[in-house]
Amino acid sequence: MNLLLANIRGDTGSDQSLASMKHLHFPMGLAIIAGHIRKHRPHHRVFVVDGYLDELGDQDVFGVIGDRDVDCVLMSGFLGNFQYGFAKRFITAFFNGFPAKRFILGGPMASTVPELLLANTAAPEERFICVIGEGEATAIELLDTIEAGGDLSTVAGICYRHADEVIRTVQRPRLVDIDQSVPDYWLLDTKRYAAYVKKNGRCWEIIASRGCYGSCVYCKLTFGKKLTYRSPASLLAEMEWVFHEYGIDAFNFVDDNFLNSDAQVWAFCDALRKSRYRFRWRFQGRADRFSPEIAEALAAVGLFDVSFGIESGSPRILDEMNKKLDLDKAMKNIRAIPPTLDTHATFIVGMPSESELSIAETERFIGNSGLRHVSAGILTLFPGTVLYENARRQGRIPDEDAYCESLGPVYTQPYVNLTRYPDDQLIAWAQRLNRLDRG
């Protein structure tokens, strides 16, 4: 089959030219799927279209589909920045022009609201398919089934429409070994992304683990609670390859749980210590696990920046979030961080019990901890989370499709306000916390 991996920019009505973009991200998920397909099913012809790099519109992409005689389009999507509405309109337009072709959607959007998306998108039955969770094994089995004209219901981890019914198949077991889940840097125009990273002084992004053990009421776990880790050898090999090919020596680990395995942290530290290269790198993790011992050891092998999801300085709000963060330990660890390390922390304003008292407690935590950079946003309710489901049952989200359509930039405004205060107050509180940034 001829497959098109499409990194398509949604039409948000704003300037999306390459020159105006502040945060251009390499399409990691699509690149990983591309690598898996090319390795395990090399008979497929795989093409890529990148609407961000080449500033392509919908009709440009449809032209590529026709010119390349594409059988199936694969795309990833997330909730926010109006991507849900864009995906519905793009997929509907796709099938208006190519009713006999297939469209496979993966990523957080497909994993979070597959039934909603399928029920509200005009597409022929069994032609539009959502992949739920990890996509590597699912993509291979799904493409094999399509190629053989088989029964989609036998493929685990997908959702599709059949006979006016939305069908979700059984959940696919999580991958045990993710060392092989590395991006296909050769297929995509990686040099242009690398040039953007270097020009803007940013870090190259790497994924070191999947899953999260947490149960925060505002968060939807795309991969579930089970934690899987890439080996330090695999991570170091990717870092060295990127350095050799593109001259990039700064990296950002974008997964949520870098610190949750002491053995993994120390093994990675040891691998960096033995490497002949010196890299600069950063990650995000839990402040109550970032001990002074770990901080000193990682700083010695290139760690220059760390980001923490504190979310609130109020114990009451943290309990309401089910965050399970030890604030005293977090405070102690942050204060002990070597001065050579930069520190960032995120905070969320707008939990149901938010008040002037909780904001003041958060201000005190920021001031007493010595955090250098602060980023406070307003609570966004995501489908599949405890807070979202509570709000839906309470009638605060009467139309889920309309709500997902309305989700623009996340954490910037209260799309649904759960507090007893007006929207303007939440915005003012977030601005107040952001002014504590010492950058």
Image (cartoon, rainbow, N blue to C red):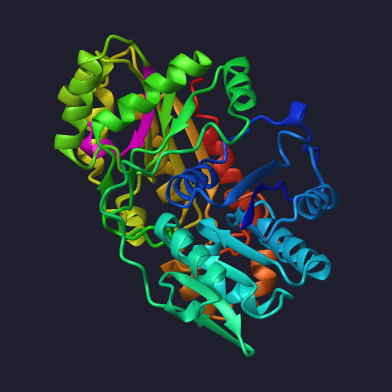
Instruction: Say whether residue 419 is visible.
Output: no
Residue at 58% across, 16% down? 198
Residue 61 position, x and y percent, is: 78, 49
Residue 249 position (above or below residue 421): above
- In this view, the residue in front, 413 or 358, is 413
Q: Nearer the viewer, residue 196 or 391?
A: 196
Q: Nearer the viewer, residue 413 or 286?
A: 286
115 relative to 313, above or below: below
Query: Does the stretch in magenta take in 284?
Result: yes
Q: Is residue 120 left or right of residue 155?
A: right
State yes or no: residue 345 in magenta: no
Look at the image and give the residue range highlighted in magenta.
280-291
Residue 403 pos. (x, y %): 65, 68
Q: Nearer the viewer, residue 83 or 342?
A: 83
Relative image position of residue 371 (x, y in whole percent): 38, 26
Residue in the picture at 58% in, 70% down? 129
Can residue 348 be seen in this snapshot? yes
**Where on the picture, by quarter, is residue 236?**
top left
- Residue 322 position, x and y percent, is 31, 59
Horizontal arrangement in the rendering, residue 307 relative to residue 271 (left or right): right
Q: Which quadrant would the N terminus be assigned to in this image?
A: bottom right
